[in-house]
Image: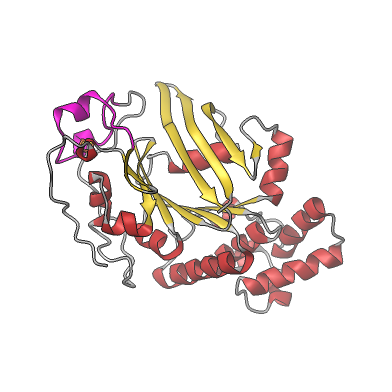
């Protein structure tokens, strides 16, 4: 498998009135061409900041302090704004929870699809319009000839989300980053949008990074999952590793609400008792220690490394140390 994206030891912080928030604290992962990877965790765990760091779309008070980002064989860690604009337009598409983040209310859907094609691919308006119409068809928007002339406010929530997916795909990017793309939608539309993304991934071989708090959503689309907590990856593995052989107490907590990823039931994650760590003063030890029923002395003293469990499966928990006491995994996997 050829790697499309490689992130090495990424550290990102935000300057605030009360101090420096260390939002991402050394994150490393990769994504193969055409692969779908899920990044899962509660809000504030660093998952969206990781993606915004890659895209160079951090808020003004944010900065990448350290790390390397290789995209399609090129080191884009130090890419200039203009180059990043081209990469964002051509090679990486984004889908957000709120379609109005991407859709401009004062332009028709057609204008918004045609413009990037003319700008980034040098097409004339007729060629661009043909592609735009095809793209609207592909994402399942009925009567595209009529819809292409309409404004975003004339679309329903689900249709707007489809239009945004069409926009993110129109230049045939190699990678789509979808940040909570279905959270605001009702369950039926949510399932349709996920099916659509799956379909498009298969048809166009687009790689996807899906950022979500909902493990059920990830299981349907992705082959691998990174679980994030307190600004670090606490467990990484295939969908089956995470659902059936989880080795981190935080993952166990997340899984309690989604016992069987092969069922049709998609539930929201049940909140885990306690609060996430204060990243103004991140703990020296395991960031989950204050909420963990299994915490030991070493957990407070030293951050656990990512222990290798199996090929491609790692967990940052001291329970995986060879000398750790054996505990019964409270999640019952079903093969
Ligand atoms: Fe719990 Fe310790 Fe594992 Fe952290 S390292 S998850 S505190 S057992």
Q: Is residue 57 visible?
A: no
Quadrant of picture, ligand 1: top left
Figure quadrant of the C terminus: bottom left
Residue 186, quarter of the rendered image: bottom left
Figure quadrant of the N terminus: bottom right
Q: Which residues are magenta?
A: 283-306
Q: Residue furthest bottom?
A: 143
Residue 317 % position (x, y): 25, 38
Q: Is residue 284 visible?
A: yes
Residue 170 % position (x, y): 69, 61
> In this picture, is 87 found above or below 125?
above
Residue 151, quarter of the rendered image: bottom right
> In this picture, is 289 found above or below 41?
above
In the picture provided, is 90 more to the left or to the right than 190?
right
Q: Residue at x 60, y 68 (%)?
A: 155
> In this picture, is 284 found above or below 79?
above
The answer to if 284 sits in the magenta stretch is yes
In the picture provided, is 171 more to the left or to the right than 319?
right
Residue 101 % position (x, y): 58, 51
Q: Nearer the viewer, residue 309 or 59?
A: 309
Q: Nearer the viewer, residue 25 or 184?
A: 25
Residue 40 % position (x, y): 38, 49
Main secondary structure of the magenta stretch: loop
Q: Residue at x 63, y 56 (%)?
A: 103
């Amino acid at each position: 498998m050829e790697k499309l994206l490689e992130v090495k030891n990424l550290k990102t912080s935000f300057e605030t009135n009360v101090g420096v928030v260390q939002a991402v604290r050394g994150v490393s992962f990769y994504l193969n061409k055409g692969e779908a990877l899920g990044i899962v965790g509660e809000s504030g765990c660093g998952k969206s900041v990781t993606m915004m760091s890659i895209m160079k779309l951090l808020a003004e008070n944010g900065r990448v302090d350290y790390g390397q980002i290789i995209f399609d064989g090129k080191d884009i860690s130090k890419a200039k704004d203009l180059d990043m604009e081209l990469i964002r337009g051509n090679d990486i598409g984004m889908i957000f929870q709120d379609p109005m983040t991407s859709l401009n209310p004062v332009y028709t859907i057609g204008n918004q699809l045609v413009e990037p094609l003319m700008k980034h691919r040098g097409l004339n308006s007729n060629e661009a319009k043909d592609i735009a119409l095809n793209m609207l068809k592909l994402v399942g928007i009925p009567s595209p000839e009529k819809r292409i002339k309409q404004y975003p406010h004339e679309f329903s929530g689900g249709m707007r989300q489809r239009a945004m997916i069409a926009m993110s795909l129109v230049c045939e990017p190699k990678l789509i980053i979808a940040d909570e793309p279905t959270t605001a939608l009702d369950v039926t539309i949510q399932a349709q949008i996920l099916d659509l993304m799956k379909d498009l991934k298969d048809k166009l071989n687009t790689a996807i990074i899906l950022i979500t708090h909902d493990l059920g959503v990830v299981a349907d689309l992705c082959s691998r999952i990174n679980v994030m907590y307190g600004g670090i990856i606490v467990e990484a593995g295939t969908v089956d590793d995470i659902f059936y052989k989880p080795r981190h107490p935080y993952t166990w907590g997340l899984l309690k609400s989604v016992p069987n990823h092969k069922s049709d039931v998609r539930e929201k994650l049940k909140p885990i008792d306690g609060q996430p760590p204060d990243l103004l003063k991140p703990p020296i030890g395991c960031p989950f220690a204050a909420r963990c029923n299994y915490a030991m002395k070493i957990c407070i003293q030293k951050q656990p490394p990512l222990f290798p469990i199996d090929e491609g499966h790692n967990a940052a928990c001291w329970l995986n140390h060879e000398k750790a006491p054996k505990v019964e995994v409270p999640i019952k996997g079903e093969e």
